[in-house]
Image: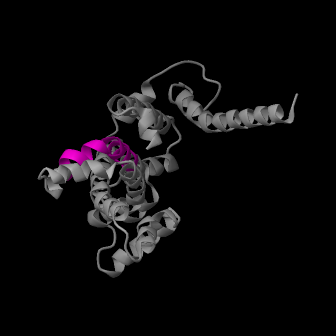
């Protein structure tokens, strides 16, 4: 057996080990969610009572509604802000372009907890503190760099001659944007929106610092529940979210092609 063969086998073994490491917690969560004996393994039966309790909880349903609205608004605002920024960075060369790009991508360089605390302190100093507006601003700033990255890559793959041809036949900038640019980068927009929504939906640090009373997102509600409760309702809710995420991947695959979304 050659050294190359040994290296290939070692790489495949390491890859499988990492995949098992990532999948194992998900598998345990799903098993616990249908286990009548709560957290006692191995399971001794099958039940959907934990799912029923999770989806009948007003607290969790309210948290899902808050996370849904927050994720949709944050993803929409992030992409609306990232698109013109990406177009400016891709289509133009100007002094300080690298610095502007660095500033826009800087939330990725700061640990989320530190970023959340700093944002909270800043809003307190300007007289807001925690509230709906600070929460939306925090989520939007947090996910915007991802939208900027994906849209920048999509625009780099767009042939500028398409836009030039549209302008040559009389289309204005707005008409060119909606008739040429956005349809061509549709896959990037879909993947950017989906990623921003998922990141906002799963965010905990920003939500725990900035969420006002009555607007508590699901991750914070789930964290508060598992601090004081020791049943499998939380596992059932987490299992439901895992299945919904799988469904979302299927929908994205049908709409835009999952391979193209991941490649963009």
Residue 160, above or below 135: above
Q: Is residue 80 above or below residue 18?
A: below
Of residues 133 and 18, the one nearer the viewer is 18
Q: Is residue 53 magenta?
A: no
Task: Pick the residue in front: 117 or 91.
Answer: 91
Residue 31 in the image: state x and y as whole percent.
Answer: 56, 27
For the point 16% across and 55% down, the residue is 174
Q: Please say whether residue 188 is one of the residues in the magenta stretch.
A: yes
* Residue 123 visible in the current orientation: yes
Percent across and percent down for residue 126 are 31, 80
In the rendered image, the quadrant that contains the N terminus is: top right
Task: Residue lying at the far bottom in this picture: please name it.
Answer: 125
**Secondary structure of the magenta portion, mostly?**
helix
Residue at image coords 28%, 61% = 84
The answer to whether residue 211 is seen in the rendering is: no
Q: Quadrant of the C terminus?
A: top left
Q: Given the current orientation, which residue lies at the most extreme right position?
A: 1
Q: Is residue 202 left or right of residue 177?
A: right
Farthest residue to the top: give it: 45
The answer to whether 199 appears left or right of 25 in the picture is left
Q: Which residues are magenta?
A: 177-196
Instruction: Return the x and y of residue 13 as percentages of the image width and height.
Output: 74, 33
Q: Tell me where residue 139 appears, x and y as whole percent.
A: 36, 59
Q: How many marks?
A: 0
Identify which residue is drawn at 37% across, 73% down: 94
The answer to whether 122 appears left or right of 22 in the picture is left
14 and 11: which one is in front? 11
Q: Quadrant of residue 216?
A: bottom left
């Amino acid at each position: 057996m050659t050294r190359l063969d040994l290296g290939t086998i070692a790489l495949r073994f390491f890859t499988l080990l990492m995949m098992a490491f990532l999948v194992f917690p998900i598998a345990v969560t799903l098993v616990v969610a249908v286990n009548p004996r709560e957290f006692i393994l191995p399971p001794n039966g099958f039940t959907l009572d934990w799912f029923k309790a999770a989806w009948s909880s007003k607290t969790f349903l309210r948290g899902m509604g808050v996370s849904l609205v927050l994720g949709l608004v944050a993803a929409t605002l992030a992409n609306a802000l990232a698109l013109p920024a990406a177009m400016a960075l891709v289509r133009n060369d100007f002094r300080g372009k690298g610095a502007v790009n660095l500033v826009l991508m800087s939330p990725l360089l700061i640990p989320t907890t530190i970023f959340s605390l700093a944002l909270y302190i800043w809003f307190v100093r300007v007289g807001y503190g925690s509230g709906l507006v600070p929460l939306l601003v925090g989520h939007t700033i947090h996910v915007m760099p991802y939208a900027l990255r994906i849209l920048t890559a999509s625009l780099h793959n767009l042939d500028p001659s398409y836009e030039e041809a549209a302008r040559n036949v009389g289309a204005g900038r707005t008409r060119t944007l909606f008739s040429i640019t956005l349809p061509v980068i549709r896959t990037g927009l879909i993947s950017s929106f989906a990623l921003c929504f998922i990141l906002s939906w799963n965010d905990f640090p920003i939500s725990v610092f900035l969420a006002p009373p009555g607007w508590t997102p699901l991750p914070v509600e789930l964290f508060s529940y598992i601090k004081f409760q020791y049943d499998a309702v939380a596992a059932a809710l987490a299992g439901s979210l895992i299945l919904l995420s799988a469904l979302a991947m299927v929908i994205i695959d049908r709409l835009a092609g999952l391979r193209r979304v991941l490649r963009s």
